[in-house]
Image (cartoon, grey):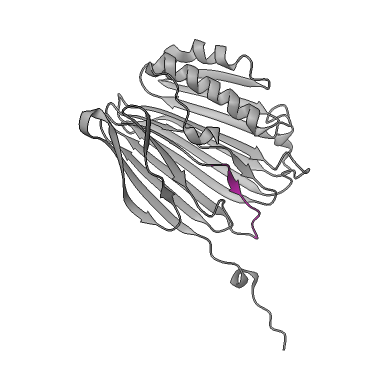
Amino acid sequence: MNMAFPLDALVRPGWQARLALDFACGAAGRTRMRATHRLGPLAVQKAHYPEGEVCHALLLHPPGGMVGGDRLRVDIAVQPGAQALMTTPGAGKWYRSLGATSHFDLDFRIESGATFEYLPQEAIVFDGALGASALDVTLEPDARFIGWDIVALGRQAGDAAFRSGRLAQNVSLRRAGVPLLIERAVYAGGDRLLSSPLGLAGWPVVGTLFAAGPGVAKALAAVRAALAPAGGPSGASTWDDVLVVRVLGDCTQRVRRSLEVVWAALRLAWLGRVAVAPRIWNT
């Protein structure tokens, strides 16, 4: 006998995962990392110290991508004076969905005198994906933050264009409870805005770097000089102790390389710190 089941009954409900981390100053000023809560397949690799007191951490999601219905959340507390950098081991992926939306939420709280850098590798949005991400950063008045986001709409190889689906992204930067930046971007597959000069003008990869903290405006000239050879449309601006950089390109490698050069210039001009790339970037 043939039996019919609702489609939702044949599809797994998705991963439910949460990871909470704490970065705090330890002996001799070196920042220590510890996980305070873990649920599901989110994890963090052992910390590395390629530049002295700055803690380099690797955020892991073993399933390798987001499938319809997944809900992931990462909460990070950077304690007073702590210095930390976090990246990911490879490209993130938003896979085709049968109807459920995947969610990835990040909440960073950066305390007095602390610096946190969040530099994940690119995220590929497959045709038919349904995703929503939120980045909420709360800073104390003298805290500093650098973060970037690289989104590839579809795959450049194999003519896998982003013709359907949707990715909604929300970014919020606040200092002492006061909004510095509230931004929302929605990428809808097949939308004319993706090809319009008022939107992405046909470029399939968009990279954005955000920096917030006292004195960041002084790095604008260095950042713009670093952007000059980007190859695609790019720009940088500052206001209210916030700096935003955008780069468009035809492949993730070029956009990422442009942001790496910008990051190195920003780090030196603003933080007075030479850029030391996470070693995973070279593997």
- Give whichever of 217, 275 is nearer the camera: 275
The quarter of the picture where the C terminus appears is top right
Of the pair 218 and 23, the residue shown nearer to us: 23
In the displayed structure, 232 sits above or below 103; it is: above
Q: Classify residue 106 as left or right of residue 209.
A: left
User: Is 28 left, or right, of 265 in this rendering?
Assistant: left
Query: Where does the image place residue 5, in percent across and percent down from the top left?
Result: 65, 77
Q: Is residue 14 above or below residue 170?
A: below
Quarter of the image holding residue 200?
Answer: top right
Q: Is residue 119 visible?
A: no
- Residue 38 placement, left or right of 259: left
Q: Main secondary structure of the magenta part?
A: loop
Q: Position of residue 43 (x, y in %)?
A: 42, 50
Q: Nearer the viewer, residue 233 or 155?
A: 155
Q: Position of residue 88 (x, y in %)?
A: 49, 40
Residue 16 shown in magenta:
no
State yes or no: residue 96 in magenta: yes
The number of callouts visible is 0
Q: Is residue 23 left or right of residue 241?
A: left
Q: Which residue is depicted at the point 72% across and 26% down?
A: 197
Give 83 or 211, whichever is nearer the viewer: 83
Q: Residue at x 52, y 18 (%)?
A: 237
Which part of the image, by quadrant, shows the N terminus? bottom right
Q: Which residues are magenta?
A: 90-98
Residue at far right of view: 159
Residue 187 location, x and y as percent? Answer: 64, 41
**Residue at image location 55% in from the left, 42% down from the top:** 90
Q: Is residue 174 visible?
A: yes
In the picture, residue 11 is in which quadrant?
bottom right
Q: Indicate whether 234 appears above or below 278.
A: above
